[in-house]
Amino acid sequence: MAKKVIVKIHNILENKNLSLRELSRLTDIRHAALSELANQKRKNINFQHIEKIADALNIEDIREIIDFSDNRD
């Protein structure tokens, strides 16, 4: 079975009590780009965005941001 990359931005924001708009301000990433990433609408991941998110939220382990799941599509 194929794997699918999952971006866990919604989980992170909920745990840190932040909004997507706040994350946008903290990272200087467009709100629309973060929304697409968070809602699994992006086919490509910009690793600079992942680095900015990790830096802004003091995340040390990339697995807190992205993970794999079984692709059942």
Image (cartoon, rainbow, N blue to C red):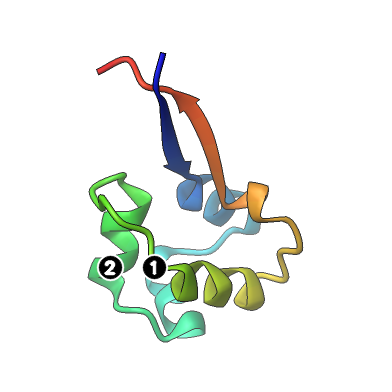
Residue at label 1?
Answer: 46
Residue 19: horizontal and vertical position, in percent? 45, 64
Residue at label 2?
Answer: 33
Res 37 label: none
Tag 1, which secondary structure? Answer: loop
What residue sits 53% from the left and 64% below the top? 18
What residue sits 29% from the left and 59% below the top? 35
Image vertical order of residue 10 relative to residue 18, above or below: above
Residue type beneath disc 2: Ala
**Mark 2 and mark 1: span between their CA atoms?**
10 Å
Q: In the rendered image, which quarter contains the N terminus?
A: top left
What residue sits 76% from the left and 63% below the top? 60
Mark 2: give few (<14), some (14-19) or many (20+) Cα within 10 Å.
Answer: some
Image vertical order of residue 62 relative to residue 67, above or below: below
What residue sits 65% from the left and 77% below the top? 55
User: Are discs 2 and 1 less than 8 Å apart at CB?
Assistant: yes
In the rendered structure, the answer to whether residue 54 lies left or right of residue 8 reads right
Q: In the rendered image, which quarter contains the C terminus?
A: top left
**Residue that lies at the very extreme toward the right in this rendered image:** 60
**Residue that lies at the very extreme toward the front in this rendered image:** 1
In the rendered structure, the answer to whether residue 62 lies left or right of residue 67 reads right
Image vertical order of residue 1 relative to residue 43, above or below: above
Q: Which residue is at the front of the view, 11 or 48?
A: 48
Residue 44: horizontal and vertical position, in percent? 30, 56
Residue 12: horizontal and vertical position, in percent? 58, 52
Lower sequence index among marks 2 and 1: 2
Tag 2, which secondary structure? Answer: helix
Image vertical order of residue 15 relative to residue 30, above or below: above
Residue type beneath disc 1: Asn
Residue 28: horizontal and vertical position, in percent? 41, 86
